Amino acid sequence: MVLRPHVAGLSRSRLLAGFVFALCAFGCLGTTPPQRLATATPIALVVKLESAAGVAIEVPARVQHELAATLAARNLQAEPVPVGAIGDVRTSQERVAALLRATAAAGTAPWVLLVEARARFFSLLSGRYRWEVELRTSLVPRERPDAMQVSDLSVAAFLQFEHQGEAEALDFVRRQLIEDLAALVDRVLADVGAVRP
Amino acid sequence: MGMRGLICAGVAALIATSARVHAEPERSRFSAGGYLRVMTRPDLQGGDGKLGYWNLHGRLLNEGPYAALELKLDMLPETARKTPWTSLHAKIEGGSVQGASRDNGSLASFRLSQLYARAGNVGLADVTWQIGSLDYYFGELGLYDLRPAQLFFETVGLSARYRRGVVDLLVGVGDSGFLLRGDKYDTVLTGGLALRVRVAARFELGAGGQLVYEPEVKGNRFAPHVTPGIDYEDYVRGEVVQRYDEANPGRLDDLPRPQPTSALGWKAVAYLGFGVGPLKWNNLFLKVELRLPDQFVVETFAERDFTLHVAALTNERMSVQLGNEAQLELVPGALDLVWGVLIGEDSDGDNSIVPSDYDRSYYSTVLRLQTYVTPELHLLVETSLAREISHNGNAYRSAGDSVFGSTAGLSDPRGLEIGDSDTRDTWQLKLGPVLSPLGLGVYARPSFRLLYGLQWSSQINAFGNSFVESLDQFNQYGSPNQRWHHVIALEVEAWF
């Protein structure tokens, strides 16, 4: 008896087409639409990045931009506040309070968002510089500071080069930061009756 | 200031330090990270699942499974600049996974490869002390998974690393005996340094070196010795004692006694890293090394074991390696390219008669293109071209009927050459889709890959296999004569 490979009813070209289709389908997987306020609403935004030793580091522009874009998708217009506005205070509560005070004069943003990031070097691990980035996102309604919502996240960044540091580590984990922020904001907006498009 | 004043100042400093409160969430002082790669590569041509022999053709499809886990305990976390901190590290790693390798995940394949403690700003500001494993490297060639500019890989000892501004200086001392000599341990004193200077934001230089010295110790059978009067060819053939007996019948007890000596090796490395425009980064490494000589071999003759010390026959092994890897962003967000080149020259001044990995040249280039259909769906194409040249005659079989023992290409049962060619040329192609949940980047991980690999080699069956290669007429299996090799791989690689 001669054994022959046989795929019933499927030609090679159809198999290939099915494979390509599956790949494209994966690449086009949809995501849940964000909660969205009915009207554009300003939100004061501060992002503070520190080294393990507490030294302030400049936040990469791409991170700032993507945070603003995430908020914009929810009809929240980010109003960047200089990080100096929160001064030298070191706890999250003090920083939020300082941010509320600093933006009170402007007064138009009913929401305040503080993103804190601290990156510390772990080790050179199998060819990658492993960093650990601790993230805390605090979303505060100006009129009800006691209703502050906080999300904590700890993620690892894997950098390729010695010269890369805290800023690159934050940039590396920005996707996780964005998703965490999006989940937090959606949760809060759902409570205030925002709608999904 | 008297002693009491110093104590008061110290206590005040401690209180001030502990009173610093940070905004970050409370976190565990224990953390763990690691690396893994695991794959299945059914091989319908009799191979073991690897496309070719080794990383010279690029690490992709040429490496097996691997896992590493590093544990870290921040005993005293860094909380402010120039304040003391300390951490403990342990790394366990190995290349075995159940169902993906021959030893099926055996823990015997894993090892505690690194164990060390670090402390910073203790005694000297901006200095990090490290005791334990000292492994250090300037960077790596990611395409090859090689680290040419690596120091202290074998060393356990003490290092001090000063980092301030653009200067990064490491000085280390220790003992490399256990890793270099294993169960034949002998002290191998090691000392060296590495200096990295960041000349500009995207331009840095580095250089370093290490000396390894194995001292003369009379009476220690694992210390370097020389057995006088050994002919190199007799040593290669394992016939030193036989020849002695032929020349001196009945006088085996008079075989020359080993003479104690010392041994020396060294390594010098250099590094240049820079980035400009679409060139995200370029790593250039150079290594020149004189290897430490071997210890001894044991020959059995007339039902007796004879130990022959071969330090004098293996102390001229030089290795030069030059590697470069360039990462380019050809079309931002759409197409990236990584190009690697590796050149190696190994020479053994003692050996001019037998092909050896210590006496060869190799040249390789690997080019990887990765394009992004979506941020999470990439297409990868990699190709490599490599040439390996044996300095001491034939080392490769380019035909199924070429003989194993030869001299100058002619059949010779006592010939020290192998096969019919002193050159092996290899070309590889790898391509397929890559799923990258974390988005763009050739080195973005985790990556889930479905790859097809194709190899052509001037050597037949140039991949790990289980063929019966005998030319014996009673070989029941026969030997295939394959230059082309195909592999399909489903694999994942991640750091965590």
Image (cartoon, rainbow, N blue to C red):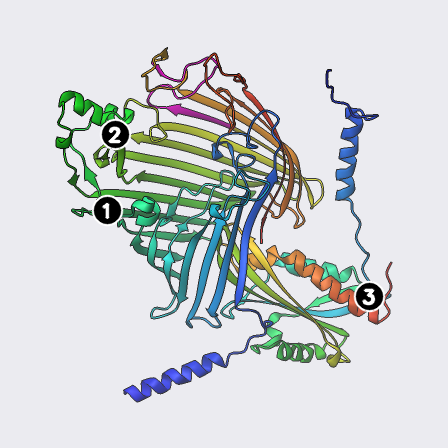
Residue B105 in the image: above or below residue B19: above
- The chain ID associated with circle 1 is B
- The chain ID associated with circle 3 is A
Left/right placement of residue A100 relative to residue A193 reads: left
Answer few, some or many: residues within 10 Å of disc 1's Cα (few below 14, many 20 plus, some between 14 and 19). Answer: many
Q: Nearer the viewer, residue A154 or B271?
A: A154
Q: Position of residue A174 (x, y in %)?
A: 64, 58
Q: Disc 2 marks which residue?
A: B303
Residue A96 lies in quadrant: bottom right
Answer few, some or many: residues within 10 Å of disc 2's Cα (few below 14, many 20 plus, some between 14 and 19). Answer: few
Same chain, marks 2 and 1? yes
Question: Alpha-carbon distance for marks 3 and 2?
Answer: 93 Å
Write the residue at 50% across / 48% down.
B107
Amino acid of disc 1? Glu
**Does dot 2 land on a helix, a strand or a loop?**
loop
Question: Alpha-carbon distance for marks 2 and 1?
Answer: 32 Å
Q: Disc 1 marks which residue?
A: B214
Q: Position of residue B436 (x, y in %)?
A: 66, 46
Looking at marks 2 and 1 on the same chain, the residue that comes earlier in the sequence is marked by: 1
**Does dot 3 land on a helix, a strand or a loop?**
loop
Q: Disc 3 marks which residue?
A: A40
**Residue A90, numbered circle:** none
Question: Alpha-carbon distance for marks 1 and 3?
Answer: 74 Å
Amino acid of disc 2? Glu
Observer able to see residue A162:
no
| Residues rendered magenta in the picture | B385-407
